[in-house]
Image (cartoon, helix red, strand yellow):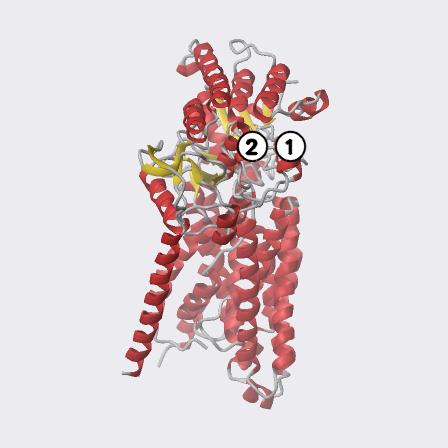
Amino acid sequence: MRRNKVLIIILVILLLFASTGCQGGQSDQGPESETKTIMDMAGREVEISTNIEKVYSTSAIGSVLLYTLAPEKLAGWTSELRDSEKIIIAPEYHDLPSLGRWKGSTPTGSIEELLKAGPDIIISVGDVSPEYAGDADEIQNLTGIPVVMVDGSLQKTAEAYRFLGDLIGESERAEELAAYSDKTLEEISTNLKSIGEEQKVKVYYAEGMEGLETEVSGTVNSEAFDLAGAKNVAVPDTPDIRRMQVSIEQILVWDPEVIIISTDGDTTHSVYNKIKSDKTWANITAVKNNEVYEIPNYPYDWINRPPSVMRLLGVKWLSALLYPEVIKTDMRADISEFYSLFFNYEISEKEIEDILETAERK
Amino acid sequence: MKNTAFVAKYSKLKIIVLVLLPILLAIVALTIGRYPVSYADIWKALTGLFFAESNLSATAHTVIFDVRIPRILAAIIIGMALSVSGAAFQGTFRNPLVSPDILGVSAGAGFGATIAIINSWGSLGVAISAFVFGLLAVWLTYFIGNLIKRSGDITLILVLGGILVGTIFSSLVSLIKSVADPYEKLPAITYWMMGSLGSIQMKDIYMVIPPMLVGIIPLLLLRWKLNLLTFGDEEAQSMGVNTDRLRLIVIICATLLTASSVSISGMIGWVGLVIPHFARAITGPNYRSLLPVSMAVGGSFLLVVDTIARTLLAMEIPLGILTSLIGAPFFIYLLSHSRRSWK
């Protein structure tokens, strides 16, 4: 009996909380601003304001996309900027609030901080599958701010820019970046047509502290490899696997011709040095032929993690590295152009040499 | 009415089987793996150790000597260390549900590893930091235990202290994880927590052998005294045992064993909890035989599970997950089928 009473009291309290929560959500809607209903890239209908001043992205992928498109409309970053980001990102955006990653019902940021920053919309860039759509709906319900989903796959970069540009009234700038994206990817895929399936270079993508983690082919995380014409040795043997740990024995079986290392932002080249000197790696074709490279990470990884628009440059770099006879390009000029166009940053020759130090065939 | 000669012979047989078991399994494990190495190559490699000439392919040589042998050795010694440490703790705390991380060593080690990963200290840094923080956590537990012990049961207070310290360290880990870089650091922390022997090399083994020996030798020498601890402090003291000192020695040794294991393998759950029970089912609760049997069974168990982890799929199955998945149902089976006392 007594237990029942306690239960009832708890239930009543919970109900009270739940009902006040709903009220809070409703009273948030601004009365005066005009709205329109749009269809986002996941096919969801979202009602948004016609005049968008501030945008927040749930992840770093979107922050980079937004920054390159319209930095003045960024409502905040997902986490404090790292030192390397502060070099590239213009100083006036260094002090934007850090509002956390938002995924599903377990955000790392605070709702109140987010509301204080006052974004007109939130964008969720990445996978647009139904399960992620559910996450977006949840964030929308939680915050009362419309959440717009944007396809984050590399191949749809141009489409994403145009879509977002229209949404926030930055079509001109969006078209400029979209045109670059289309041109880059089209050029590479045209040039790679002459490479047959059996001529493709076998690549192992080494991640993690020991280089014994990898990303299987066919996901957003390994898309850059697929588009650069690499034959990713890691083929999933069970569905729904993305990142996986592998044993050195398995890598010996795959015997990749090229090893591409994710540095995880570590500037000490620890995995690179280990793979090149450790005897367990020594008999792999890539190591024997000195075909071991680090992915440039300045200020973001060029290939993955976060899978951002940096990958446009990454695919160019990787395809030129793997197929120098068909992809003929001046990497140094490409790098200057990319950083200037996307980040409005004039990169120095020394920076380029640092980036390419372990990313080029010597 | 049993024939004593038969019993003696039977237990001798048991000993021989238990000593041979890990060795036989190791030989079998040496022949299994993702990279195809023929039996002939393995034979060549092993005989090549004694006769200098060896016409083995370089890759096969690497696979046998630099990949499989270190990993097999690591699985055996870590399995042994965790099991002995679990058995010793269970006796000391007179509690069958005690596992080697009861005093917070795993949580502490996890925190140490997390800090090292966040600061990019490299794999050696991770191992050292995990080891140091593992020991630190247990020291904290012991310190708290002595601080609040009045007349109460010291073992109970220590267990409580262990829960406290463990909770604090795992909360700190969660805190760091929630702010860690999701693309770079978070996966590394998560993988470490799941445990793996995938990157074990001989130098890791050389590194943990000294602290492990320091931990295991006193336990083996004092193993008959562990029986006295299971009777309870008063009885043990009446038999002239300094229980406080003995308990401290056991805690230090068992902690050294666990911390060294965790530092190179990450978290591997359930071995230290289940294996001592299994060993008890085989040999009974007497620590004279229980510790050696736990060692043999634990080493064999972890070797078998790790061999599955590295061979079943192209991906490595996280070892800690596999030991839990196999260990938990096995534990239930043991509990429901064993009528023996756990002491």
Q: Is residue A333 above or below residue B280?
A: above
Secondary element type, mark 1: loop
How far across and down, in percent of the image, does residue B212 sit?
Answer: 62, 59
| A310 lies left or right of A30 | right
Query: Is residue A9 found left or right of A285 in the rendered image?
Result: left
Occupied quadrant, residue A362 = top right
Asked if one can make out residue B161 in the rendered structure from this viewpoint, the answer is yes
Amino acid bearing label 2? Pro
Please determine if labels 2 and 1 lie on a single subunit.
yes
x, y percent for residue B214: 66, 63
Find the residue positioned furthest to the bottom: B238
Q: For mark 2, what is the residue?
A: A71
The image quadrant where one finds the N terminus of chain B is bottom left
| Residue occupying the point 30% across, 79% down | A5
Residue B297, image x, y percentages: 46, 60
Q: Nearer the viewer, residue B91 or A326?
A: A326
Q: Chain of mark 2?
A: A
Q: Quadrant of residue B250?
A: bottom right
> Is mark 2 in CB contact (under 8 Å) with mark 1?
yes
Q: Is residue B195 left or right of residue B132?
A: left
Residue B183: percent from left, percent from top:
52, 40
Q: Amino acid at mark 1?
A: Ala
In the picture as drawn, the residue positioned furthest to the right comes out as A350
Residue that badge 1 annotates: A90
Q: Residue at x 48, y 64 (%)?
A: B294
**Residue A122 location, quadrant:** top left
Mark 2, Cα crowd under 10 Å, few <14 / some 14-19 / many 20+, is many
Query: Mark 2 or mark 1: which comes first in sequence?
Result: 2
Rendered residue at 34%/40% (across/down): A133
Q: Is residue B46 visible?
A: no
